[in-house]
Amino acid sequence: MKRVTTRSFVVSSLALLLIVQSASSEPAGPYTAEIETFERFVESQMEIDRIPGLSVGFMKDDFLWAKGFGFADLENRTPATERSSYRLASNSKSMTAVAILQLVEQGKIDLDAEIQEYVPYFPRKRLPITVRQLLGHLGGISHYKDYELEGHIKEHKYPRDSLAIFADFDLVAEPGTEFEYSSYGYNLLGAVVEGAAKQPFGQYLREHLWGPLEMDDTYMDDPDRVIPNRVQGYRIVDGELKNSEFVDISSRFAAGGTRSTVVDLLKYAKGLGSERVLSPKSVNLMHTSLTTADGHFTDYGLGWKVSPVDGRFCVYHTGGQPETRTLLVRFPREDFAIAVAYNLEGGNLHAYARRLVQLILHEAWNVPAYTGDRVDEALFKALQDAFNYGFTHFDRYCEPRSTDQGELAEAFAYLNACLSRSALESDYDVALKKITDGRHPTAKEAFVKVGSYVALKLQEEVGSDQLDMYHKMGAIPFFHDYIASYRRDPNYPDAFRFSGKLEELLTAWNRDWQRTWNEYTRYLVIAPFADIRVIGGRLKKLFAGAKVYPDFRESFVQLVRHHYVKGNEREALAAARLYLDLYPGSPAAHVMMANTHTCFGNRNEALTSLRRAFELNPEDPAVTTKALARYAAELIDNGRLNEAMTLLETTVEFVSEKATLYDHMAAIHIKKARALYMKALDADPVSEHAWKMLKRLPSEVIPTP
């Protein structure tokens, strides 16, 4: 029997027998070193994120580890543990989907029936909506329409009350045509469960999901109920940690109304692969992306987001609401799952799961290649999509998407056309649209067919065990080795080859990639607690002279933002300069430098950097009005009002859609006015004018970017 540390567990059977060891024990088992490294990471990252309490765990085959960090309740100094009970928020949705599919298996629900078949009191809309469409957020049902009213409900709501909130809302899209994420749609599905099962939603889950999987610490959240190990929630307001606003989430019952532990989430993840609550056919249906009417995958199945990681089949869901953030990730083929929950409204939720993937699977989470050229970037995107989605198909089903020679020839022809440099140079937008469509049904899943066929051929060449190497190494070696394989066979069909120019390009890219994507970069963590000067020295040396190398831009954005928000001028400038040195063609690098200069009073330098960002690519996501407003909102959230105002004043002249930025400026003035009126009352508590003006000002003033 495996030994484990305090607040750490081992799965000894499908029933998830939990065993606790003494407090003095050290980690033991197959992942001892990895767990120790991860624990150090969690403690450092939590400090950066300012998370009071966090619980995290993973399950791999028959091993399960979970642990709590920090405090579930700061006021009472109650430690967070693996059994701390967090609001799950939208991680409730997949459980609702399980209930629906169980009732489908029982013949009580038809996925393609109209919802009024099971919820006759819900008013019909101008177009019919099916159960399947609701499960995939294709029903056209609105999400929150006015969060100021709908997001702060204090009183208990019964399911019928919850549906009444949005019953008269118009459809936001024709059902089946657009992915429109909707918690209200999942509340409606909760009513479908009640109508078909003839019992309350929570009772159904207890009897048919939580009970069978021994999820004894999972409940419908209820402020009146005594729930063991309930955590307290927190938020950051004007840079200070505050208690979360109380919201009764019974109004979100089937969309986000549950409370649980990371251990129970891992039992749930394990149970979905066991046939104890659903057949493999139904689980496969849950994990298969739906498609819009125009032939595009939504990347959302029935209650799960479907998104490949390094060519591996992966499903996940996040959750966020007052008091909580949660994440549940499943790699079904690997029998691997990760659960994260913490009690802060914010933080870097995905960082914890990505670090575990690095340490347990020895892979970095979807790190692309940087080329510094938009045409090369588009060529890499085509290869990356074919690799990620095609290899994922093969990883999931152990066979290619198609074996028909004619279909494969057509798919290769499509990908080869996408890999035409001349097409991208003559009409970039049209060519990029063709690349973006390549994995979707509208393009007959050409990229999926090619990528999965290449995986088959590489497996025949290197064997199943060695095929896993490509999950670690990525798209460039994947296609380079395929080309090398067919070059050794003079009789290999021309229809399944790539152009000579692409072969030459991949040869050059692979030479650089093999050098720059190595043991060091695969495990690298770029974060405020890391020594960025040491990292910078190594990366500059490693990337020198390379045409392609690992793209860590997302990490650098987070790093620079952290430092300038915290007022760390020296560190912010050092990180921003390194970002620019490594990725000079990135508009985001120049935006981060502009933000850094702005925060520390270097307006002329900020204007120069921002102008350069727009010159490089005025349509880059980093220079949209929404992004620029988000940078300012982050400063406002952290109490840096003067810096936020300067940032907005600096950026407003560069954008055409100025209203959002002016909206944020007004919010800053309101916040400042509120603070001054409060000071006036401190100076004179009976000041009638200050009191009246304070009452007239809104309490929540930061617009949503």
Image: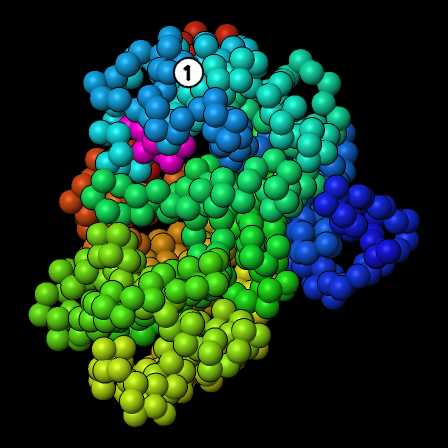
> Can you say whether 44 is above or below 426 in the image?
above
> Can you say whether 581 is above or below 265 in the image?
below
Give residue 532's position: percent from left, percent from top.
54, 69
Give residue 158's position: percent from left, percent from top.
52, 10
- Residue at 23%, 71% (x, y): give it: 409
Give the camera-side residue of 379 and 138. Answer: 138
Q: Which residue is mark 1?
A: 118
In reply to whether residue 135 is colored magenta, the answer given is: yes
Left or right for 656, reference 163: left
Magenta-tinted stretch: 133-141
Could you say which quadrant of the image residue 214 lies in?
A: top right
In reply to whether residue 35 is colored magenta, the answer given is: no
Give the camera-side residue of 653 and 500. Answer: 500
Quadrant showing the C terminus: top left
> How is the rendered protein coloured?
rainbow
Is residue 185 at least partly visible in the picture?
yes
- Residue at 72%, 59% (x, y): give it: 35
Give residue 53's position: percent from left, percent from top.
67, 40
> Can you say whether 339 is above or below 358 in the image?
above
Left or right for 245, reference 548: right
- Three-letter code, disc 1: Tyr
